Amino acid sequence: MINEKMYALGATKSKIRELFEYGKELSAKIGAENVFDYTLGNPSVPCPEKVTSVIINEVQNPSIHGYTSAQGNLPVRKAICNYNLKRYGFELSPELTYMTCGAAAGLAITLKAIISSPSDKVLTFAPYFPEYKVFAENAGATLITAPCSEVFDIDAKLVKDVICSDVQAVILNSPNNPSGTVYTEDALISLASLLQSKEKEYGHPIYLIADEPYREILFDGAVCPFIPKYYKNTVICYSYSKALSVPGERIGYVSVSPSCDNAQKLYLAIAGAGRSLGYVCAPSLFQKVIELCVDEVADTSIYKDNRDALIKVLNSSGFTCVNPKGAFYIFMKSPTPNAEDFCDYAKTLGLLLVPSNSFGVNGYVRLATCISPDLITRSEQAFIKLGKHYGLI
Ligand code: PLP
């Protein structure tokens, strides 16, 4: 027998991957210069020079290729906690920090550690990163969503309408993929207060999982509040994929806030989930890289320049969007309620855009801005044709 659920997951590509593959086929047919691929969130900037030189040095160390502790080496976990203390004035504990293969593994094992009954639910905010559904379901829970406000901020009033006693965990992703929103401090304070009152009402903790791969990518002076300062039952799932521009190296961590209810037990359950799923001993070379480069960040200023240039092109083609304050995506309103139809038409002009359905909302499209600036210039005429087709200009 083969597990049908796993088969279905493996046999169906995500919409983003499907479009990316289509883009490659189209490039072979009509030439790469006529394909404008805005689909994939793959960082387009090099990693910091220090990261490269540490890799070159450390790869020559014969012991670097050995197993590490299942939870990761103590020096890197200490370096991470020292960095967070210096940067945010909040003390995390190396004893509650677990090195992972990026945020994806961190989310998967954290959910697995928390979910214990088939009636359990995980709540997130729409629009959301599509893999949350996969991770929540694999942990045995159902994903439910609360809508965001019109400008894609969290609105505690809307959360109140959907939260119920089965909710054991809430996933919060700021800066957000796909909307680019950096949730405001006021919104987080209201959410924290709602969750605290619901914990009392329901008689169990509601763990807030802060999924933070875009924490360092902020524009226009935006500030991304450090969630453990606002809510005691926080678990951080951090990733270096975007901050250091090393997504293929698979490195990140989970850190259980020391103020969490049953922090030690939760941490051990995360370690147990890591063990049961085979997510132990994150890449050793990259544990060393993080230990030595913990305060490095790739130069991501191009994402802001791309955002500005692309919004200009979109606006002059008649499209509207909220100006994103972080991450590297623009979430643009589709001129037709059915964003899939809109994206299908855009494809005929060589424009590859991701319809919002897979992010849990209708009527929008996502454009990744981690691209070469040249792509924006080359695609301008296609956007103008698209705007004209829909009568926007
Ligand atoms: N969470 C969000 C919101 C993402 O956008 C991504 C990747 O794009 C991930 C998690 C997973 O990132 P990684 O596993 O590379 O750290």
Image (tube, helix red, strand yellow):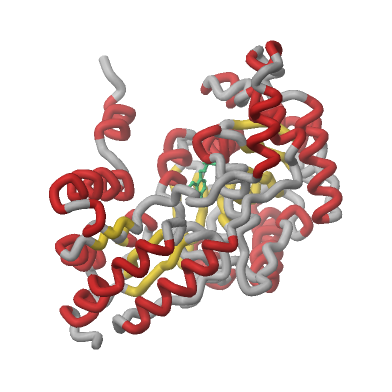
Q: Nearer the viewer, residue 290 or 257?
A: 290
Asked if residue 334 is positioned above or below residue 367 in the image, the reply reads below
Q: Residue 20: percent from the left, percent from the top? A: 29, 47
Q: Quadrant of the C terminus?
A: bottom left
Location of residue 80 (image quadrant) = top right
How many marks can you see?
0
Q: Position of residue 100 (x, y in %)?
A: 61, 31
Tell whether 85 sits left or right of 15: right
Q: Nearer the viewer, residue 372 or 363?
A: 372
Image-quadrant location for residue 11: top left
Q: Position of residue 327 (x, y in %)?
A: 54, 60
Residue 116 visible (yes or no): no
Q: Using the image as rendered, state which of residue 328 and residue 62 is in the foreground.
A: 62
Q: Residue at x 62, y 64 (%)?
A: 218
275 left or right, relative to 380? right
Q: Is residue 316 above or below residue 359?
A: below
Q: Is residue 354 visible?
A: yes
Q: Nearer the viewer, residue 355 or 240?
A: 240
Is residue 288 left or right of 245 when viewed as pictured?
Answer: right
| Residue at the (56%, 38%) spot, across then down | 111
Q: Quadrant of the N terminus?
A: top left
Residue 286 x, y percent position in the rendering? 64, 29
Rendered residue at 48%/57% (across/down)? 177
Residue at position x 64%, y 65% from top?
A: 191
